[in-house]
Amino acid sequence: MTGGFNPRLGLGFVVAESAKETAETRAVRILDRYILAEWAKVFALSMLSFMGLLLLSEGYNWIPDFLGWGASIGTIVAYLLLGLVKSLSMLIPISLLISVIFVLARARPTRSPSRIPRPAVSG
């Protein structure tokens, strides 16, 4: 193997040249898992939030009509849930965008005044 290339074998085993590469690879995998876990939390929260808002909106608009037509509770719930499935093509990209922006903004190091490098003052 040359040039730090680590071919992956069939079941995800990594072939490394040295123990140092293995430790670096392990550290990167831990960081990747942490970022993925943070993203998944924000994505799930934003997805559930938008689904709840959509359910409230649709329920507020349609439940009085359904009750006026004499529809059962099961029919109303089925209509609202099928409406959510229809709206997933709109909800997933919005939630994905929000979650990626949020996680990237949190991962960026802060630029507080105490951390900004200042030139040395002599004299």
Image: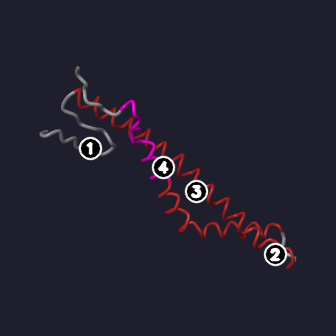
Q: CA distance from mark 2 to mark 4?
A: 39 Å
Q: Residue 56: say if magenta.
A: no
Residue depicted at x 25% and y 30%: 119
* Disc 4 secondary structure class: helix
Q: Position of residue 107 (x, y in %)?
A: 42, 42
Q: Verify CB contact (< 8 Å) between mark 2 and mark 4.
A: no
> Is 37 or 57 nearer to us in this picture?
57
Residue depicted at x 53% and y 68%: 89
Q: CA distance from mark 2 to mark 1?
A: 57 Å
Q: Which residue is mark 4?
A: 102
Q: Which mark is residue 66?
A: 2
> Is 10 or 41 nearer to us in this picture?
41
Q: Which residue is mark 3?
A: 47
> Is 83 or 118 nearer to us in this picture?
118
Q: Which mark is residue 8?
A: 1
Q: CA distance from mark 3 to mark 1?
A: 34 Å
Q: Which mark is residue 77?
A: none
Q: Which kind of residue does numbered mark 2 sit on?
A: Phe
